[in-house]
Amino acid sequence: MDKLAEMIWQRGSAWQIMKEARNRWRTAARKDYIAAHVALASAHHSLVKRYRTLLGWPLALWHISRAVLNVNRAAAYRHRSFGRPFTTDEVDVVARVWARAPSWLGGNAVRAKWLIGDALTRPGPVKPHTHALLLLTLGDIEYRLKNADKAWACYRVAEEYVLAIELEESEDRERQLVRLLSTLGFFYLDHSGGQKRLDGLMFIRRAALLAKRVSADQEKEILAGMRKRGIKTKF
């Protein structure tokens, strides 16, 4: 497992994570300017959720603003130099940053939606978890744009990738499965009733158990979401 990714997944020191990310940027920018900025944006974005507290919001805003700055630099460079398109993995990062950042910080949900739509229609193989995560981001955008039917369609298709991700040959498939299960679970719990709500609760608990084994960072986020909704965290 990549050292920086492991530091992020296991909730290592934020200072050490950013030090490593900046060192990598200095080396990578000479070889692939686009990839370097997207990677740095990803590191900043991964830390935002740590500071969603009353006292931590200034740091959260700083990290999301830096994430936006770096994806915008990558996009601008690509446009100016007629450079290569974003890879699907890069689209996952860029679209999430644009979709979740407020417009006054440079976020752009419509642009993110277009970028995901383009990535999903490209020919060629795509890892199941990448395809599923793009659908989750698209679903989140559609819901916030008040296109509930389109949002639900995205989440239903994303759910179909659970088994494929379990069988995927990649080092971080379990952590990506946690992302899928927890996102689906909280969405179903918050926006549906009956069996779908029960499915959501099952997904959340499954994600929490898996995160306990593979990612301290994801486990902490899931448990916080459970407590916020009054769900028992011991099961």
Image (cartoon, rainbow, N blue to C red):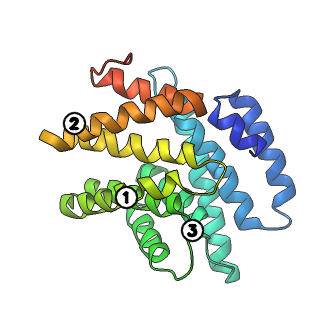
Residue 104, how many percent across, how many down?
44, 51
Whether residue 81 can be seen here: yes
Residue 228, quarter of picture: top left
Provide the secondary structure element on which disc 2 rests: helix
Q: Amino acid at mark 1?
A: Ala
Identified at 56% across, 53% down, the residue is 68
Q: Which mark is residue 197?
A: none
Residue 224, how many percent across, how many down?
41, 24
Q: Quadrant of the N terminus?
A: top right
Q: Quadrant of the C terminus?
A: top left
Q: How many numbered markers are drawn?
A: 3
Q: Is residue 59 left or right of residue 164?
A: right
Residue 210, how many percent across, how many down?
50, 33
Q: Amino acid at mark 3?
A: Thr
Q: Residue furthest left?
A: 194
Residue identified by numbered label 1: 158
Identified at 71% across, 81% down, the residue is 81
Q: Amino acid at mark 2?
A: Leu
Q: Is residue 6 left or right of residue 24?
A: left
Q: Residues within 10 Å of mark 2 (few under 14, many from 20)?
A: some
Compared with 110, 172 (above or below) is above
Residue identified by numbered label 3: 88
Label 1 or label 3, whichever lies nearer to me, is 1
Q: Is residue 160 left or right of residue 131?
A: left
Q: Nearer the viewer, residue 1 or 30?
A: 1
Residue identified by numbered label 2: 198
Compared with 192, 153 (above or below) is below
Instruction: Please tell me which of labels 3 and 2 falls first in the chain.
Output: 3
Instruction: Please tell me which of labels 1 and 2 falls first in the chain.
Output: 1
